[in-house]
Amino acid sequence: MAKKRIYEVAKELGIDNKAVVDKAKGLGFDVKSHMSSLDDAQVSKLMSSFKTAKSSKAENNQSKGKSKIKISVGAIRKRDHKEKKKNDNHNKNKRHFKNSNDRRRNNKHEQADSNSPRPAARDLLKQFKKKQRAEAGELDAQARISRQKWHEEQNKPKSAPNKSVKKEENPTRNQRRPIIKEGAEAVKAHVEASKKPVGPKIIKPSPARNKPKVKKVERVASIPTPPVEKPDSKPNRAKDFSKSNKKRHDSADYERQRNERSDKARRRRNKKKQRTQHTEVKKQPTQRKERPLPEVLVYEEGMNAQDLGKILHREPAEIVKKLFMLGVMTNQNQSLDKDTIELLAAEYGIESEEKVHEDISDIDNLYTKEMEASKESKNQVKRPPVVTIMGHVDHGKTTLLDRLRHTNVSEHEAGGITQSIGAYQVRLDDRLITFLDTPGHAAFSNMRARGAEITDIVVLVVAADDGVMPQTIEAIDHAKSAQVPIIVAVNKIDKPGANPDHVMEQLMKYGLVPEDWGGDTIFVKISAKTGENVDDLLQMILLQADVMELQADPQQKAIGTVVEARLDKGRGPVADLLVQQGTLKIGDPIVIGDTYGRVRVMTNDKGRRVKKATPSTPVEITGLNDVPSSADKLVVFDDEKTARSVGEQRAKNALEKQRENVQHVTLDNLFDTMKRENMKEVDIVLKADVQGSAEALQQSLEKIDVEGVRVNIIHSGVGAINESDVTLAGASNAFIIGFNVRPTATAKSQAESDNVDIRLYNIIYKAMDDVEAAMKGMLEPTYEEKVTGSLTVRETWKVSKVGTIAGAFVDSGYVTRDSGIRVIRDGIVKYDGKVASLKRFKDDVKEVKQGFDCGLTIENFNDIKVDDQLEAYEMQEVPVE
Ligand SMILES: Nc1nc2c(ncn2[C@@H]2O[C@H](COP(=O)(O)OP(=O)(O)OP(=O)(O)O)[C@@H](O)[C@H]2O)c(=O)[nH]1
């Protein structure tokens, strides 16, 4: 035999599951719920224990008329009422309710427990039906009243429900449920109710019962009620009492199911309530509002309402609404400008501040920061002064530097002019002085100005035999604008015509008063050629440096400035730079201008390899990806990756900028550019061997102005002329100037096929002259007369309306219809005019050549005679030499 579940046993016994579970537990079985299973032995033990209990109980309670049915119903009631224990009133009512029910059942069972239950039941049924018929009318009336009252009750506000009163007013309920009343009235009513016939009930449905709504049923079900018996159980119950147990069990199950359902419904309701509460919490927009506004709105231009909402702890919709109120129509995603954001901040009553982005690619900024940091540093030490020698052409700058370095540079310079900037260090009494060699030609003035930025002291060289010249004054101006002190070196004192005092007098006009004469400018009379007083000059420089307290921090990251840069065939890009702060070391990741790399090889001014360069040291470095420009800043980064990204970003920016410039000179807009302001321009692509030369040449060329026509350098660079230069020149209708460089083979062939003119020079003056000549070619062309043929008049005809027609023979050359014509009679020019018409026989022709006759007329001239000599000529454009 299979195992049995508790509820099956309970069903068999007709006892409540809980009672059986309790009993099973009492017997020591391992059961938890009505679903727990029992084996045969346990079942039989359990059943026998119940039977024993039943028989003993039956004996004990015989006088009281209690039965097992009572136990089960009571148990259910007990359970139901436990849920309502919170309410004391209810407990009271429950007691009444239970007593009356017990009594009702006792009565019922007293009758049912007679020897023959069936006749008793039939009698009861008959009696009941009889009474029912008799009371039908009365019940109908009561039901009507009850319905009416129920409706009234329903329509009443539910603020103070009084269930007891309500129940009292419902006669139908009174029939199946004890009337709940307080005190003696309740007892009386209870007694009366207990006297009522027992049996199947609920003939007249109450209005509440008629309500088919599930909700209502659930609400009622939640109130502990006795099991509701189905109307169709009525005859069965009367006829077959043995089935009554089953009915009661069914009824108990039904009640349990209802309770379970109601429990489920309650749980669902609770869950739903919780969910609603949750969503309410989530949806609470007011809570966001409560978050405080920031004190300052730190914004970036281009933020939208969503971004601002996050910062301000406000809904984007609110931001949009606020802006709308301020007259700004926008949506949540639309970018807002600075003014609008600040307006919004003011509307919220808070400060606004634009977020400052530190652009790592802004190396000028990094350079300035490092420079400032060095001033604050405690590691500062004395550094050598950086000196620039300036002066007029041929006043002896290079000779002085030669003397200082004991080398000879000037003899190798092309054209006799210093073409590139170098920097050198000289030593005096174990102290170093750094010299920047800045040539004095006017074309280099721009570089000189740059040189003054890194220069501590300017040595102004003035030839004692020549005195103050234009570039001397220019040099003074540059030094003064850079607030750099000037030491005057009056040179060539060895020369017989030298007059140093005259130079000193001249310079007084420019605020340079010698110390001997009460001023503060140091004057040193020297001879660069003989070396006289050169050491005195160095002493004075060091003295000036001491006064200036020049210091640097060699421990910080290096910063510097490019003095010169070039592309070396073997070594790639090479930069001459001056370290200004910190120490530059081999392997340092660097960014210089728009280029980047790692210091691969470092060479000093003596051509020796060094591993590090301290402040004020000029070095030549390799390892860059491209050629930087002079005056570009050098910054050292922590790692090569950062340096690379910064360099690439800068190069990209520079390229974009260059493209923007190039866009102005394209084939599309060339015509407009030329016509603009009635100005003619000569577009030039400039390539040079070193940056300094390129800049110098550019400066010189841009100064050329030939009757309003000027030079426009559309691109200048360092290195060989390549295909891209030719393409650019072709597209811009420009020509190319190469200074100390040559075109590549492909560039040369492309230039030939594109008809792009490439001109190569190694002397600046020559380049300038050629450009000037080319510019003259762009002016209105000059014409000269060219005699094309000579004719002899052989016959004349006078025709009215036409005038005199000359029949002439072309002796040499040719005559055209557009030719100018000169009438020469006896060696004298009688008339100079134009051919009006030219014919052979009767046909108009364009040209008649030597050996042919022709007929011609001359504009506004009819006095043509036979044997007159005619000279045909043309005006031809004269090419610029
Ligand atoms: N007698 C004499 N001649 C000098 C002296 N210094 C320079 N010279 C001569 O002056 C001429 C020009 O000298 P440079 O040193 O080339 O002059 P610079 O100023 O460098 O000229 P640029 O490079 O063209 O700007 C040379 O022939 C020198 O020999 C000097 O102290 N005495």
Image (tube, helix red, strand yellow):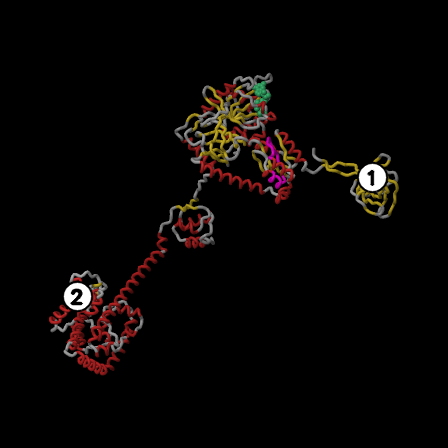
Cβ at disc 1 under 8 Å from ligand 1: no
Q: Position of residue 717 (x, y in %)?
A: 56, 35
Residue 453 appearing in the image:
yes
Residue 732 located within the stretch drawn in magenta: yes
Q: Nearer the viewer, residue 412 or 97?
A: 412
Q: What range is drawn magenta here?
A: 726-744
Q: Where is residue 411, by image quadrant? A: top right
Residue 784, image x, y percentages? 75, 36
Structural crowding at the residue carrying mark 1, measured as other residues with C-alpha within 10 Å and reported as few (<14), some (14–19) or many (≥20): some
- Taking the image in four quarters, ligand 1 sits in the one at top right
Q: Considering only vertical position in the picture, is 1 above or below 829?
A: below
Q: Quadrant of the C terminus?
A: top right
Distance in Å between CA atoms under marks 2 and 1: 153 Å
Image quarter of residue 745: top right
Give the label, 2 or 1, closer to the camera.
2
In the image: residue 213, left or right of residue 661: left
Give the crowd class for mark 2: few <14, some 14-19, many >=20 residues within 10 Å. Answer: many
User: Where residue 46 is drawn, which disc sits there?
Assistant: 2
The residue wearing badge 1 is: 850
Task: State the image coordinates of residue 324 (x, y, percent, origin top left).
Answer: 45, 54
Q: Is residue 464 visible?
A: no
**On residue 39, which mark appears?**
none
| Residue 169 image position (x, y, % from top left) | 24, 74
Residue 127 horizontal side relative to residue 147, left or right: left
User: Quarter holding the N terminus?
Assistant: bottom left
Q: Quadrant of residue 218?
A: bottom left
